[in-house]
Image: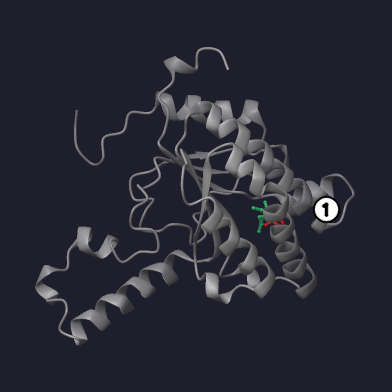
Amino acid sequence: MENIEKLKIPRHVAIIMDGNGRWAKQHGKERVEGHLAGAESVERLLEIVSKYGIRYLTLYAFSTENWKRSREEVDALMLLLTEFLRKNLSRLKDNKIRLLVTGRIDGLPEEPRNELEKAIAETSEDYEYTLILALNYGGRAEIADAAKKIAEEVKNEKLDPSVIDETLFSRYLYLPDVPDPDLMIRTSGEFRISNFLLWELSYAEFYITDTYWPDFDAAEFRKAIEAYSARDRRFGGRK
Ligand code: FPP
């Protein structure tokens, strides 16, 4: 971790963890084994991220579109999530990491939902870092849900439509107090946003690597931070 002080460190990193299936195929394994290796990669990353002092990490763990996968794969992902939470709750607490979820948490099966609620409650105080799992998450769903809440308030005469602007709208998103991501990483070489944080990624820098998610290690993460550090962010303005 030498020379970390010379790097510009993003406050919030968001990751599309792609390529578990391809990694499994490359190793002659079942898709589910790829997801298991992916979960191990998440555990490894948690250690790395806090060493860099990155305050917020959002991981795209299950999208609203992922329900279209086979029943077997969906069940395996939910089981993996449940086990991940059981196994890592004490690690989260020891490392002062609070857990948050973005997405329609009510639509998840009872077991992982219970574990999530427990982990969220038990990590909600005395934290320095925030891990956000995007689960049953869709960027369009998030924007539609915000619009619905705003419409309800207008209907109940709690809100005047003339005051709706970008700042007000963003207060109705799932996690209004979390700052927008500065860096979005996507593994396994796909140049797509896949309905991830559509609103929040407006000014994020994108870093795409061919590496499959289970192989995304400390050295790969370092490359992403170095690339970010070298970027010149202008937020639409000029220098
Ligand atoms: C994409 O790989 C990955 C997912 C849809 C799920 C992400 C889940 C994990 C990394 C493991 C569980 C996470 C936690 C937090 C415990 P893919 O299956 O689309 O890969 P492919 O495109 O190569 O088929």
Residue 30 against residue 129 in the figure, above or below? below
**Residue sitting at 60 percent across and 43 percent down?**
92
Secondary structure, mark 1, is: helix
Query: Looking at the image, how many numbered discs can be counted on the residues?
Result: 1
Q: Work out which residue is located at the far top of the displayed protein and give it.
A: 3
Q: Residue lying furthest right in this view?
A: 28
Residue 168 placement (x, y as % from top left): 21, 63
- Image position of 14 (left or right of 212): left
Instruction: Give coordinates of residue 220: x percent, y percent.
Output: 62, 30
Dividing the image into 4 quarters, which one contains the C terminus? Answer: top left
For this view, does 63 lie left or right of residue 181? right
For badge 1, the amino acid type reads Glu
In the rendered image, residue 147, in percent from the top left (x then y), is placed at: 30, 75
Residue 96 in sight from this viewpoint: yes
Q: Quadrant of residue 172?
A: bottom left
Q: Is residue 212 visible?
A: no
Q: Residue at x 67, y 32 (%)?
A: 217
**What residue is shown with label 1?**
33
Residue toward you, 104 or 111: 111
For the N terminus, the quadrant is top right
